Amino acid sequence: MPPTPKNIARLLYIAAAALFLNVALSPLAHAVPPPDLIFSAVSNIGIILTFTTAFLASAFASIHMYVGAFLHTTKGRLIAAALFVFLCGVITGGIHYYQVWQQRRSYDEWLKQSQQAKTAEVDVTQVATASPTTTPTSTTTPAPTGDPSQPSFFATNKDLPRMISNADFSQALSTATPFVLDAREDEENRYGHFPESTHIRFADIVAGDWQKMPTDKVVYVLCWSGIRGKEVADFLYSKGIVARFLEKGADGWVTYGGTWSGGIKFDQIHPEERYHITLETDQVESAMQDGVTIVDSRPKETYQKWHIPGSVNLPIIYTPTSQLVTAFAQIPTGTKLITVCDDFVSCFDARLVGLKAEQDRQAVFMGRYAKPWEYRGRHP
Protein backbone atom coordinates (compact mmCIF):
# COMPACT_ATOMS: atom_id res chain seq x y z
CA MET A 1 0.00 0.00 0.00
CA PRO A 2 1.66 3.28 -1.16
CA PRO A 3 2.29 5.87 1.58
CA THR A 4 -0.26 8.38 0.33
CA PRO A 5 -1.93 10.78 2.82
CA LYS A 6 -5.18 8.81 2.50
CA ASN A 7 -3.47 5.50 3.27
CA ILE A 8 -1.60 7.02 6.20
CA ALA A 9 -4.89 8.29 7.56
CA ARG A 10 -6.40 4.84 7.24
CA LEU A 11 -3.49 3.26 9.11
CA LEU A 12 -3.79 5.83 11.87
CA TYR A 13 -7.53 5.13 12.16
CA ILE A 14 -6.81 1.42 12.52
CA ALA A 15 -4.12 2.10 15.14
CA ALA A 16 -6.47 4.34 17.10
CA ALA A 17 -9.24 1.73 17.03
CA ALA A 18 -6.85 -1.03 18.14
CA LEU A 19 -5.58 1.14 20.99
CA PHE A 20 -9.11 1.92 22.12
CA LEU A 21 -10.02 -1.77 22.20
CA ASN A 22 -6.85 -2.48 24.16
CA VAL A 23 -7.74 0.16 26.74
CA ALA A 24 -11.34 -1.02 26.98
CA LEU A 25 -10.63 -4.73 27.26
CA SER A 26 -7.35 -4.89 29.17
CA PRO A 27 -7.52 -5.35 32.98
CA LEU A 28 -7.01 -2.19 34.99
CA ALA A 29 -5.29 -1.71 38.31
CA HIS A 30 -7.34 -3.34 41.04
CA ALA A 31 -9.54 -1.09 43.11
CA VAL A 32 -7.83 -0.42 46.39
CA PRO A 33 -9.98 -1.05 49.46
CA PRO A 34 -10.64 2.02 51.60
CA PRO A 35 -9.79 4.50 52.89
CA ASP A 36 -8.52 5.49 49.50
CA LEU A 37 -9.57 4.51 46.01
CA ILE A 38 -6.77 5.26 43.56
CA PHE A 39 -5.41 4.05 40.30
CA SER A 40 -2.09 4.41 38.53
CA ALA A 41 -1.80 8.01 37.35
CA VAL A 42 1.28 7.24 35.27
CA SER A 43 -0.55 4.46 33.43
CA ASN A 44 -3.56 6.70 32.81
CA ILE A 45 -1.48 9.58 31.51
CA GLY A 46 0.37 7.28 29.13
CA ILE A 47 -2.86 5.80 27.80
CA ILE A 48 -4.49 9.19 27.42
CA LEU A 49 -1.53 10.77 25.61
CA THR A 50 -1.02 7.81 23.30
CA PHE A 51 -4.69 7.49 22.41
CA THR A 52 -5.12 11.25 21.96
CA THR A 53 -2.06 11.47 19.71
CA ALA A 54 -3.14 8.57 17.52
CA PHE A 55 -6.74 9.75 17.21
CA LEU A 56 -5.91 13.37 16.53
CA ALA A 57 -3.20 12.46 14.06
CA SER A 58 -5.63 10.35 12.06
CA ALA A 59 -8.36 12.98 12.29
CA PHE A 60 -6.18 15.85 11.17
CA ALA A 61 -4.63 13.78 8.40
CA SER A 62 -8.12 13.28 6.99
CA ILE A 63 -9.04 16.92 7.47
CA HIS A 64 -5.87 18.03 5.72
CA MET A 65 -6.69 15.85 2.71
CA TYR A 66 -10.14 17.31 2.19
CA VAL A 67 -10.01 20.83 3.63
CA GLY A 68 -6.31 21.64 3.49
CA ALA A 69 -6.86 24.98 1.81
CA PHE A 70 -9.41 26.02 4.41
CA LEU A 71 -6.89 25.42 7.20
CA HIS A 72 -4.60 28.08 5.74
CA THR A 73 -7.16 30.78 6.58
CA THR A 74 -7.41 32.49 9.98
CA LYS A 75 -10.92 31.16 10.52
CA GLY A 76 -9.81 27.68 9.60
CA ARG A 77 -6.94 27.73 12.10
CA LEU A 78 -9.24 28.92 14.88
CA ILE A 79 -11.74 26.19 14.13
CA ALA A 80 -8.96 23.59 13.99
CA ALA A 81 -7.55 24.77 17.34
CA ALA A 82 -11.00 24.68 18.96
CA LEU A 83 -11.60 21.21 17.57
CA PHE A 84 -8.23 20.05 18.89
CA VAL A 85 -8.97 21.30 22.40
CA PHE A 86 -12.49 19.83 22.30
CA LEU A 87 -11.31 16.40 21.18
CA CYS A 88 -8.52 16.37 23.77
CA GLY A 89 -11.03 17.12 26.50
CA VAL A 90 -13.54 14.53 25.30
CA ILE A 91 -10.94 11.78 24.94
CA THR A 92 -9.14 12.54 28.19
CA GLY A 93 -12.35 12.85 30.18
CA GLY A 94 -13.86 9.76 28.61
CA ILE A 95 -10.91 7.53 29.41
CA HIS A 96 -10.55 8.97 32.90
CA TYR A 97 -14.19 8.44 33.85
CA TYR A 98 -14.23 5.02 32.26
CA GLN A 99 -11.35 3.93 34.45
CA VAL A 100 -12.89 5.54 37.54
CA TRP A 101 -16.11 3.65 36.78
CA GLN A 102 -14.17 0.42 36.45
CA GLN A 103 -12.43 1.10 39.76
CA ARG A 104 -15.71 1.87 41.50
CA ARG A 105 -17.35 -1.25 40.11
CA SER A 106 -14.42 -3.35 41.33
CA TYR A 107 -14.59 -1.73 44.76
CA ASP A 108 -18.36 -2.24 45.04
CA GLU A 109 -17.93 -5.91 44.18
CA TRP A 110 -15.18 -6.24 46.82
CA LEU A 111 -17.39 -4.51 49.41
CA LYS A 112 -20.30 -6.81 48.58
CA GLN A 113 -18.10 -9.89 48.94
CA SER A 114 -16.70 -8.58 52.22
CA GLN A 115 -20.16 -8.03 53.67
CA GLN A 116 -21.34 -11.45 52.53
CA ALA A 117 -18.28 -13.08 54.09
CA LYS A 118 -18.90 -11.32 57.39
CA THR A 119 -22.59 -12.28 57.37
CA ALA A 120 -21.60 -15.91 56.92
CA GLU A 121 -19.42 -15.81 60.02
CA VAL A 122 -20.78 -16.94 63.37
CA ASP A 123 -22.01 -13.90 65.33
CA VAL A 124 -20.10 -13.22 68.49
CA THR A 125 -21.52 -10.73 71.01
CA GLN A 126 -18.91 -8.17 72.05
CA VAL A 127 -18.96 -6.32 75.35
CA ALA A 128 -17.08 -3.07 75.97
CA THR A 129 -14.13 -3.86 78.19
CA ALA A 130 -10.57 -2.67 78.55
CA SER A 131 -9.44 -5.39 76.14
CA PRO A 132 -7.32 -3.81 73.39
CA THR A 133 -8.88 -5.98 70.69
CA THR A 134 -12.57 -5.64 71.62
CA THR A 135 -14.74 -3.06 69.92
CA PRO A 136 -16.75 -1.17 72.58
CA THR A 137 -20.49 -1.53 72.12
CA SER A 138 -21.95 -0.86 75.55
CA THR A 139 -24.64 1.82 75.74
CA THR A 140 -25.39 1.41 79.44
CA THR A 141 -25.74 4.76 81.17
CA PRO A 142 -23.19 4.95 84.02
CA ALA A 143 -24.11 6.03 87.50
CA PRO A 144 -23.73 9.80 88.02
CA THR A 145 -20.76 10.99 90.04
CA GLY A 146 -20.02 14.16 92.03
CA ASP A 147 -22.42 16.15 94.19
CA PRO A 148 -25.61 14.03 94.39
CA SER A 149 -27.69 17.19 94.87
CA GLN A 150 -26.65 18.51 91.47
CA PRO A 151 -27.00 16.71 88.14
CA SER A 152 -23.66 15.76 86.67
CA PHE A 153 -22.43 17.17 83.35
CA PHE A 154 -23.00 13.76 81.85
CA ALA A 155 -26.55 13.50 83.18
CA THR A 156 -27.36 16.93 81.77
CA ASN A 157 -25.84 16.32 78.33
CA LYS A 158 -26.10 12.56 77.81
CA ASP A 159 -28.88 12.97 75.23
CA LEU A 160 -26.73 15.01 72.85
CA PRO A 161 -26.45 13.31 69.44
CA ARG A 162 -23.31 11.16 69.34
CA MET A 163 -22.41 12.49 65.88
CA ILE A 164 -21.73 16.15 65.15
CA SER A 165 -21.69 17.77 61.71
CA ASN A 166 -18.82 19.87 60.40
CA ALA A 167 -21.01 22.97 60.56
CA ASP A 168 -21.98 22.38 64.19
CA PHE A 169 -18.39 21.58 65.13
CA SER A 170 -17.28 24.82 63.49
CA GLN A 171 -19.90 26.66 65.51
CA ALA A 172 -18.69 24.97 68.72
CA LEU A 173 -15.16 26.17 68.00
CA SER A 174 -16.35 29.76 67.71
CA THR A 175 -18.17 29.79 71.03
CA ALA A 176 -15.76 27.99 73.37
CA THR A 177 -12.40 26.27 73.69
CA PRO A 178 -13.32 22.63 73.08
CA PHE A 179 -11.50 19.47 74.11
CA VAL A 180 -10.62 17.78 70.81
CA LEU A 181 -9.39 14.19 71.03
CA ASP A 182 -7.36 12.86 68.11
CA ALA A 183 -7.83 9.09 68.39
CA ARG A 184 -5.87 8.24 65.24
CA GLU A 185 -2.57 6.40 65.01
CA ASP A 186 0.82 8.02 65.71
CA GLU A 187 1.73 8.05 62.00
CA GLU A 188 -1.52 9.81 61.10
CA ASN A 189 -1.03 12.43 63.80
CA ARG A 190 2.52 13.11 62.62
CA TYR A 191 1.30 13.77 59.07
CA GLY A 192 -1.16 16.38 60.29
CA HIS A 193 -3.48 17.24 63.16
CA PHE A 194 -6.11 19.60 64.48
CA PRO A 195 -4.34 22.50 66.27
CA GLU A 196 -4.17 22.09 70.07
CA SER A 197 -5.88 18.72 69.99
CA THR A 198 -5.01 15.94 72.45
CA HIS A 199 -3.64 12.86 70.73
CA ILE A 200 -4.28 9.47 72.35
CA ARG A 201 -4.48 6.31 70.27
CA PHE A 202 -7.78 4.42 70.22
CA ALA A 203 -6.20 1.30 71.74
CA ASP A 204 -4.64 3.32 74.57
CA ILE A 205 -7.98 4.98 75.35
CA VAL A 206 -9.68 1.60 75.67
CA ALA A 207 -6.76 0.22 77.70
CA GLY A 208 -7.19 2.89 80.40
CA ASP A 209 -6.31 6.34 79.09
CA TRP A 210 -10.00 7.18 78.96
CA GLN A 211 -9.48 8.29 82.55
CA LYS A 212 -7.52 11.28 81.21
CA MET A 213 -10.64 12.67 79.57
CA PRO A 214 -12.47 15.63 81.13
CA THR A 215 -15.86 14.86 82.65
CA ASP A 216 -17.09 18.45 82.79
CA LYS A 217 -17.13 19.22 79.07
CA VAL A 218 -17.84 17.64 75.71
CA VAL A 219 -15.02 15.58 74.19
CA TYR A 220 -14.96 15.94 70.38
CA VAL A 221 -13.41 12.85 68.79
CA LEU A 222 -11.48 12.90 65.53
CA CYS A 223 -10.45 9.89 63.48
CA TRP A 224 -9.84 9.69 59.73
CA SER A 225 -13.32 8.96 58.40
CA GLY A 226 -15.65 8.80 61.42
CA ILE A 227 -15.73 5.02 61.87
CA ARG A 228 -13.16 4.80 64.67
CA GLY A 229 -14.47 8.08 66.06
CA LYS A 230 -17.87 6.52 66.63
CA GLU A 231 -16.31 3.54 68.41
CA VAL A 232 -14.32 5.86 70.67
CA ALA A 233 -17.34 8.08 71.40
CA ASP A 234 -19.48 5.02 72.25
CA PHE A 235 -16.78 3.71 74.57
CA LEU A 236 -16.30 7.05 76.37
CA TYR A 237 -20.07 7.33 76.77
CA SER A 238 -20.06 3.97 78.55
CA LYS A 239 -17.58 5.50 81.02
CA GLY A 240 -19.72 8.54 81.80
CA ILE A 241 -17.98 10.96 79.44
CA VAL A 242 -19.93 13.12 77.00
CA ALA A 243 -18.23 12.39 73.68
CA ARG A 244 -19.21 13.30 70.13
CA PHE A 245 -17.48 12.22 66.93
CA LEU A 246 -17.09 14.31 63.79
CA GLU A 247 -19.40 12.91 61.11
CA LYS A 248 -16.78 12.32 58.40
CA GLY A 249 -13.69 12.46 60.54
CA ALA A 250 -10.59 14.52 59.92
CA ASP A 251 -10.74 13.92 56.17
CA GLY A 252 -14.25 15.34 55.95
CA TRP A 253 -13.26 18.27 58.18
CA VAL A 254 -10.34 19.21 55.93
CA THR A 255 -12.54 18.87 52.83
CA TYR A 256 -15.08 21.13 54.54
CA GLY A 257 -12.34 23.73 54.90
CA GLY A 258 -11.81 23.41 58.63
CA THR A 259 -8.66 24.39 60.50
CA TRP A 260 -5.88 21.84 60.09
CA SER A 261 -2.09 21.70 60.39
CA GLY A 262 -0.16 19.47 57.97
CA GLY A 263 -1.39 16.74 55.66
CA ILE A 264 -4.27 14.28 55.89
CA LYS A 265 -3.99 11.85 52.94
CA PHE A 266 -1.88 8.74 53.49
CA ASP A 267 -1.33 8.28 49.75
CA GLN A 268 0.11 11.78 49.46
CA ILE A 269 2.65 11.05 52.19
CA HIS A 270 3.36 7.53 50.93
CA PRO A 271 2.65 7.36 47.18
CA GLU A 272 4.72 4.19 46.69
CA GLU A 273 2.79 1.50 44.84
CA ARG A 274 3.26 -1.20 47.48
CA TYR A 275 1.11 0.75 49.95
CA HIS A 276 -1.81 0.86 47.54
CA ILE A 277 -1.88 -2.37 45.56
CA THR A 278 -3.89 -5.39 46.57
CA LEU A 279 -2.88 -8.95 45.76
CA GLU A 280 -4.89 -11.77 44.23
CA THR A 281 -5.32 -15.16 45.91
CA ASP A 282 -3.01 -16.86 43.40
CA GLN A 283 -0.26 -14.37 44.23
CA VAL A 284 -0.67 -14.94 47.97
CA GLU A 285 -0.56 -18.72 47.57
CA SER A 286 2.59 -18.46 45.49
CA ALA A 287 4.21 -16.07 47.96
CA MET A 288 3.44 -18.40 50.87
CA GLN A 289 5.26 -21.19 49.08
CA ASP A 290 8.27 -18.88 48.92
CA GLY A 291 8.18 -18.33 52.69
CA VAL A 292 6.56 -14.89 52.81
CA THR A 293 5.23 -13.89 56.25
CA ILE A 294 1.47 -13.34 56.44
CA VAL A 295 0.25 -10.81 59.02
CA ASP A 296 -3.50 -10.60 59.65
CA SER A 297 -4.56 -7.04 60.54
CA ARG A 298 -8.15 -7.89 61.41
CA PRO A 299 -9.41 -7.67 65.02
CA LYS A 300 -8.58 -10.58 67.31
CA GLU A 301 -12.15 -11.91 67.39
CA THR A 302 -12.31 -12.06 63.59
CA TYR A 303 -8.88 -13.66 63.40
CA GLN A 304 -9.86 -16.33 65.92
CA LYS A 305 -12.93 -17.33 63.89
CA TRP A 306 -10.73 -18.15 60.92
CA HIS A 307 -7.35 -17.12 59.54
CA ILE A 308 -4.79 -18.26 57.01
CA PRO A 309 -2.76 -21.04 58.68
CA GLY A 310 0.62 -19.81 59.84
CA SER A 311 -0.36 -16.13 59.84
CA VAL A 312 0.17 -13.90 62.86
CA ASN A 313 -2.42 -11.48 64.21
CA LEU A 314 -1.38 -7.84 64.54
CA PRO A 315 -4.10 -5.18 64.41
CA ILE A 316 -2.24 -1.97 65.24
CA ILE A 317 -5.40 0.04 65.84
CA TYR A 318 -6.50 -2.32 68.64
CA THR A 319 -3.04 -2.89 70.17
CA PRO A 320 -1.97 -0.58 73.06
CA THR A 321 1.33 1.24 72.63
CA SER A 322 2.85 -0.73 75.52
CA GLN A 323 2.30 -3.97 73.55
CA LEU A 324 3.40 -2.85 70.08
CA VAL A 325 7.06 -3.85 70.43
CA THR A 326 6.09 -7.36 71.53
CA ALA A 327 3.47 -7.59 68.79
CA PHE A 328 5.92 -6.65 66.04
CA ALA A 329 8.49 -9.09 67.39
CA GLN A 330 6.28 -11.77 65.81
CA ILE A 331 7.52 -10.56 62.41
CA PRO A 332 10.97 -11.98 61.51
CA THR A 333 13.57 -9.32 60.78
CA GLY A 334 14.11 -8.73 57.08
CA THR A 335 11.21 -10.94 55.97
CA LYS A 336 8.96 -10.38 52.98
CA LEU A 337 5.53 -9.44 54.24
CA ILE A 338 1.89 -9.53 53.10
CA THR A 339 -0.91 -8.17 55.28
CA VAL A 340 -4.50 -9.47 55.39
CA CYS A 341 -7.64 -7.33 55.78
CA ASP A 342 -11.32 -7.43 54.89
CA ASP A 343 -12.97 -4.05 55.54
CA PHE A 344 -12.46 -0.30 55.69
CA VAL A 345 -10.62 -0.11 59.01
CA SER A 346 -8.58 -3.33 58.81
CA CYS A 347 -7.36 -2.47 55.29
CA PHE A 348 -6.04 0.86 56.54
CA ASP A 349 -4.53 -0.95 59.52
CA ALA A 350 -2.89 -3.36 57.06
CA ARG A 351 -1.01 -0.52 55.39
CA LEU A 352 0.18 0.83 58.73
CA VAL A 353 1.45 -2.65 59.63
CA GLY A 354 3.41 -2.78 56.38
CA LEU A 355 4.85 0.70 56.93
CA LYS A 356 5.85 0.08 60.54
CA ALA A 357 7.27 -3.39 59.76
CA GLU A 358 9.53 -1.79 57.18
CA GLN A 359 10.70 0.81 59.70
CA ASP A 360 11.05 -1.40 62.80
CA ARG A 361 11.69 -4.89 61.39
CA GLN A 362 13.42 -4.06 58.08
CA ALA A 363 10.69 -6.07 56.35
CA VAL A 364 9.91 -5.93 52.64
CA PHE A 365 6.23 -5.05 52.32
CA MET A 366 4.66 -6.66 49.23
CA GLY A 367 1.09 -5.36 49.59
CA ARG A 368 -2.29 -6.25 51.07
CA TYR A 369 -4.59 -9.21 50.56
CA ALA A 370 -8.20 -8.09 50.91
CA LYS A 371 -10.13 -11.29 50.06
CA PRO A 372 -9.44 -13.76 52.88
CA TRP A 373 -12.85 -15.34 52.29
CA GLU A 374 -11.67 -16.37 48.82
CA TYR A 375 -8.62 -18.11 50.30
CA ARG A 376 -10.87 -19.83 52.82
CA GLY A 377 -13.08 -21.07 50.00
CA ARG A 378 -10.08 -22.70 48.36
CA HIS A 379 -8.68 -24.11 51.60
CA PRO A 380 -11.64 -25.08 53.82
Image: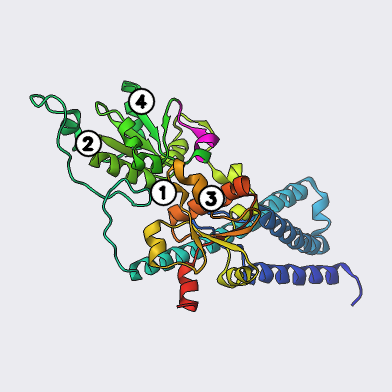
Report the span colored magenta.
Answer: 188-195
User: Alpha-carbon distance for marks 1 and 3?
Assistant: 13 Å
| Number of numbered discs | 4
The circle on residue 216 is: none
* SS at circle 3: helix
Foreground: 79 or 308? 308
Q: Residue at x 54, y 42 (%)?
A: 265
Kindly state the secondary structure of the residue where label 2 is placed: loop
Q: Are marks 4 and 1 in contact (CB under 8 Å)?
A: no
Could you tell me which quadrant the N terminus lies in?
bottom right
> Residue drawn at (42%, 45%), measured in percent from left and top?
225
Would you say 133 lies left or right of 293 here? left
Q: Given contact means CB atoms under 8 Å apart, are the residues at marks 1 and 2 in contact?
A: no
Look at the image and name its color scheme: rainbow
**Which is more foreground, mark 2 or mark 4?**
2
Q: Looking at the picture, which amino acid does disc 1 mark?
A: Tyr
40 or 153, nearer to the observer: 153
Which mark is in front, 4 or 3? 3
Which residue corresponds to mark 3?
Answer: 328
C-alpha span from label 4 to label 1: 30 Å
Q: Residue at x 43, y 41 (%)?
A: 252
Which residue is denoted by mark 4 in the rendering? Answer: 173
Residue 194 or residue 288, whichever sits in front: 288
Find the residue positioned furthest to the left: 149
For label 2, the residue is: 240
Residue type, label 3: Phe
